[in-house]
Amino acid sequence: MAEAEFKPRPIVPLTPEEEENLVNTRLAMEDRQQVRRVTKRWQMHVNSDIPHPESSEHFLLELESFRLAYRKNDIIVRAEERQVIEYQESKTRLEQEVIQVLDEIEKLKLTLEESQEHRRRKIAYDEIADKINELPSRAEQENQINALLAEVAAIKEEKAADDRVKEERKQGLAELNRVFDLLRIVGKGAGAVVQDSDALVHEVTAVDGDVDMASTQPIEGEMEEGEEREVDSQVIQESRTTSTLNPLATEFHPQGSGSAALLMRNRVLRGDYSASTPGAGSPIVGSPAPASGDADVEMGEIQSQPKDSLPIRPPSEELEEGEASDNSTLSSLDD
């Protein structure tokens, strides 16, 4: 405990103001002591009853020492003043230097920011330049644009051509429908259709010569090979029935064989004809107008002949087997 109590404490350093006050106090104290000492010597020299020759010398020595001390203090004071002036000057200089350094720091900061901004801009410029270099040149882009414009123009032309072809096909189909309607009106049976097929082929070929009928869709009602055979057999059967009902009626024989005529008729109905068909380049030939009495005759029927046009036959030829006339007698029947 005793050692802890007598432990020396660390000396606290004085501030510059405290040191200056201490120095001034010591100087003042020395001045007072010297003044007191000189004053004491003077009083002893003056108040002594018996003047001592050494007293004046001691007084002069004391006065000279005081003068030297005073000069010393004066020198010290002047030196301190000079130091103060130098200190103020150095302080001002340091402050100016500090200001200059701060200005330089600000300038360096601005320079650094500018350099960083310049570097960022350079990096961005390099990136943009790389992207621009990757892109094609102006001439190549113009060539691409011209090529695209040419393609667009070609596509427009193709579209216009397709529209024209569609319109022509539409007109051709409308004309085919008109021809089919005309065939339905004119229909006089398979033989009449075959007779008028050449004129119809000329008319349809002249109207639709520029239309590619091979690319169109199959028309409804198109007959296949089996259907053609059925129609052929039906026509033959109708001819047999007609001959049975009216043996005296003249049998109709179309140009060529029946299957060839039906094939030609089906080709006309389907539009399956070529430009090499004879008479394709000839002008449109109108179909023969039906007679007033033939308008109601359908395909496959036999037109009834008027009484005036019937051939006059003997009564015996008009009677069928097992049939008797009004003028016949029993004797004739017995025969």
Image (tube, grey):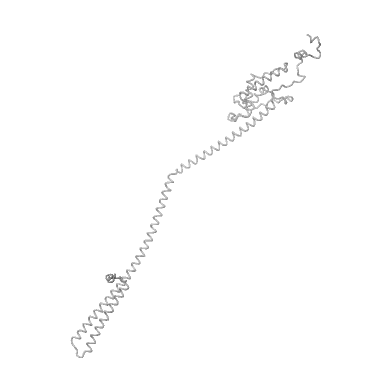
Q: Quadrant of residue 113?
A: bottom left
Q: Quadrant of residue 24?
A: bottom left
As drawn, the residue found furthest toward the left would be: 53
Q: Nearer the viewer, residue 296 or 170?
A: 296
Q: Nearer the viewer, residue 326 or 299?
A: 326
Residue 223 coordinates in the image, percent (x, y)? 62, 26
Q: Is residue 169 above or below residue 278?
A: below
Residue 26 coordinates in the image, percent (x, y)? 28, 77
Count of labels in the image: 0
Q: Is residue 332 above or below residue 160?
A: above
Q: Would residue 39 be found to the left or right of residue 102 on screen? A: left
Quarter of the picture containing the N terminus is: bottom left
As drawn, the residue found furthest toward the front would be: 1
Q: Is residue 239 above or below residue 180?
A: above
Quarter of the picture containing the C terminus is: top right
Q: Nearer the viewer, residue 275 or 24?
A: 24
Residue 268 coordinates in the image, percent (x, y)? 63, 25
Q: Would residue 300 be found to the left or right of residue 139 on screen? A: right
Q: Is residue 91 above or below residue 316?
A: below
Residue 111 coordinates in the image, percent (x, y)? 38, 58
